[in-house]
Image: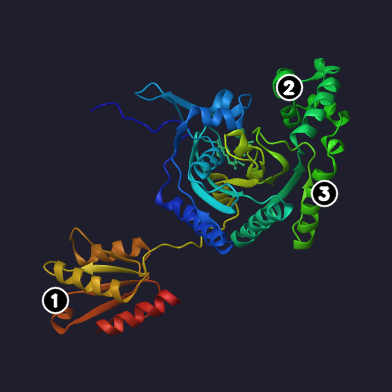
Amino acid sequence: MGKRITAIRGMNDILPSQSVAWRHLEDTVRNLLTGYGYGEIRLPIVEYTELFKRSIGEVTDIVEKEMYTFEDRNGESLTLRPEGTAGCVRAGEEQGLLYNQVQRLWYAGPMFRYEKPQKGRYRQFHQIGVETFGMVGPDIDAELIVLTAQLWAALGISELVRLQLNSLGTSAERARYRTDLVAWLEQHREQLDEDSQRRLTSNPLRILDSKDPATQAILDQAPSLADYLEDESRTHFDGLKAMLDAAGVRYEINPRLVRGLDYYGKTVFEWVTTALGAQGTVCAGGRYDGLVEQLGGRATPAVGFAMGVERLVLLLETCDKVAHLNLQPHAYFIVSEGLEAQSLAMAGRLRAALPGLRLTMHCGGGKFKKQVKKADESGARVALILGENEAASGELAIKYMREDRPQETITEAAVVERLLALMQG
Ligand code: ATP
Ligand code: MG
């Protein structure tokens, strides 16, 4: 026997027992987004490396150390997408969806980052992302946040997530702030953690993100970005807050929320939970008015977010919101030897008459008793039995597996009625 080949570290198999929760989340999101007028876009998983360097930023965790980059057979540098926004903007521009238009788009799928695998952090993980284009005001920012709030309600996890909000202002405002922040932090360089010292020259705003207590103590005294916002940015942020207030969405202003990607400006937000340990951000996004132009298109306002599917599924499991998603069969078909073809035909008629019916056929033969045991193990509510007698009379026996009710032999039409009642009940 050869050596067993395993999956790649941090890349997970999602088994049927888990995918039920995934489906529930995906279906809920899809229905909600459709209701808000968002269209699905399906994008390639691999793009030119340059796309991510130019959009996410050279001096970010993702580009510096997390990308799966390789040369294809032509010697071109390609990268497995670490996030979806860059590809979505690339496609929108390339397909002529952006200039002078309003777009509301969403996508779902795997993303790849070379990170240290742990609970809620994987190397292949999944996001559902939403990107909107062509809308400049805070109304669309509010729409995105309100629809995520509605999603948490639909999933039954509203009590477990909190909204953090900040404004990063315009690039000019950030540049002025950066100068003052660096000047201030330089005076305390010795007290900063190593990463933050390095970022002083490369990406100083990311220092605000530092989890190091000593660095945080210094930051408490540092200048605040909020004081650098001018009229337009402030009006935008105030407008957003007023709309969230009116919609009854609670938020916390977190002046340290900067996000790990360079393209954000003005609104940024994160939905966080304390129920998952360190990996607490389940959904994150913001405005990126500069990105389309940065990637060679004409200036187009844009705002979006992405949610982490694994983390949301973990959250649903943690608070027991998935146990009821029962996908056990309604019925299990017990098949007598020699009547396989007739059973299959009968099952086919039942499936045609009852869309949504979950009916498992017994395949592979075996004694009646063994088949009843399988029916029980499957979790089916009833067993359908086609034996010699039933076949002769054109009937079917129905055996109730979960209730104290005698077995009946009835017509096919009556079976359809029984199954329908069971499916609706
Ligand atoms: P974190 O701070 O946790 O590393 P991030 O800021 O890098 O997150 P984003 O790039 O904003 O994450 O991605 C949006 C969402 O995707 C995150 O809020 C999270 O829910 C999820 N996510 C990001 N990276 C991973 C990962 N490696 N494994 C699982 N989910 C992830
Ligand atoms: Mg990260």
Left or right of 173: which side holds 112? left
The quadrant in which the N terminus is found is top left
The quadrant in which the C terminus is found is bottom left
Query: Is residue 404 shown to the viewer in this render?
Result: no
Q: Which numbered disc, 2 or 3, marks the residue that appears first in the sequence? A: 2
Please identify, in this view, whether the residue under mark 3 or under mark 1 is nearer the observer: 3
Which image quadrant for residue 44?
top left
Left or right of 365: which side holds 316? right
Q: Position of residue 100 (x, y in %)?
A: 60, 50
Q: Is mark 2 within 8 Å of ligand 1?
A: no
Q: Position of residue 105 (x, y in %)?
A: 55, 52
What residue is pinned by disc 3? 235
What residue is pinned by disc 2? 196
Compared to residue 230, the image places residue 365 above or below, namely: below
For the point 45% across and 30% down, the residue is 9
Q: Amino acid at mark 3?
A: Thr
For the point 45% across and 63% down, the residue is 326
Please identify, in this view, whether the residue under mark 2 or under mark 1 is nearer the observer: 2
Q: Amino acid at mark 1?
A: Glu
For the point 55% across and 34% down, the residue is 118
Which quarter holds ligand 1?
top right
Q: Amino acid at mark 2?
A: Ser
Q: Secondary structure at mark 3?
A: helix
Q: Secondary structure at mark 2?
A: helix
Q: Nearer the viewer, residue 34 or 378?
A: 34
